[in-house]
Amino acid sequence: MEEMWTRAQEADSNIEAWHMEIASYYENTQYGSGQIQSIIIDVNGEDIHEQDLLLGQVYFEYKRVGDKQYNKDMENGTWSEVPADQDSSSATGYTSQFLELPSMAASQKHVGTETIDEEEAEHFRFTLTPEGVSQMFSTQPSFDFGENTGGEVDVWIDSDEYYLLRYELVIRGAIIPEQIGKGDIRFVVSIRDINEPIEITPPI
């Protein structure tokens, strides 16, 4: 475990491009279960293309290419240049925070070797105490984890290149916005095309 995580941290520091898909779901609420939102992100160096979706429909989209940022008007489909927000990327931190899991988890184990997107990967499972969840998501504004009762995280790391390929996280007892109330939250994150050519061009 320790050797794998050291290699994963080294591999993460050498990633310059990737495609990431993030989906969040609510479960075990008074309204049952359903998807909250999803995010699709392409990154190539400092260039970023992000789409935020709700119920399968894009409600926000932007590109940052070089020192310029472009936002899309979702009503008429036109793009406009806006002041670049260097902190606007949802991509930053999605891998680094999960590479800190061994130090935050109450328990951990190696589940086995599996195939993820045709890549051989090592599957690890971690359990988090309520304090561990609050620590891990101290800067997450979308949900209230103040009354959470802990969670589990499954992580898949490429067996050869040591890249983080996928993780699934379940947090129990979170307060979910939009008046959904208390329930469990599941995050599913898939990462592929790591360090592959990803072209992000200005829309106008």
Image (spheres, rainbow, N blue to C red):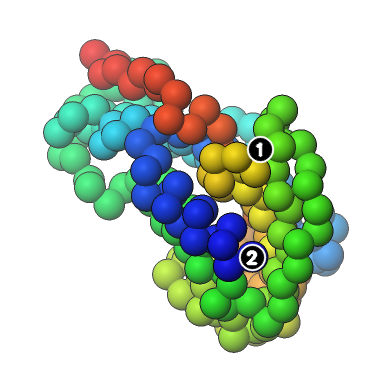
Q: Position of residue 73 (x, y in %)?
A: 36, 27
Res 22 visible: no
SS class of the residue under badge 1?
loop
Question: Circle 2 sits on which residue?
Answer: 1
Above or below residue 100? Residue 50 is above
Q: Residue at x 18, y 29 (%)?
A: 66
User: Which image quadrant is residue 120 in?
Assistant: top right
In front of the other: 165 or 93: 165
Q: Which disc is residue 21 wearing?
A: none
- Across and down, in percent, residue 181 comes to 70, 70
- Neighbour class for label 2 at 10 Å: few (<14), some, many (≥20)? few
**Residue 1 % position (x, y):** 64, 65
First of labels 1, 2 by sequence position: 2
Count the numbered circles shown: 2
Going by the numbered disc 1, the residue's amino acid type is: Leu
Residue at left offset 72%, top offset 78%: 107
Residue at 65 percent of width and 43 percent of height: 159
- Mark 1–mark 2 Cα distance, whole angstroms, equals 37 Å
Kindly indicate the quadrant of the structure image that contains residue 199: top left
Helix, strand or loop for disc 2: loop
The residue that mark 1 highlights is: 55
**Of 65 and 36, which appears nearest the observer?**
65
Pair 1/2: label in front? 2
| Up-down relation of residue 114 to residue 2 (above or below) | above
Q: Is residue 108 left or right of residue 71?
A: right
Dividing the image into 4 quarters, which one contains the C terminus? Answer: top left
Determine the residue positioned at 60% across, 40% down.
160
Residue 132's x, y, as percent? 59, 80
Contact between labelled residues 2 and 1, with CB atoms less than 8 Å apart: no
Q: Is residue 95 left or right of residue 151?
A: left
User: Label 1: how many residues lie within 10 Å, few (<14), some (14-19) or many (20+)?
Assistant: few
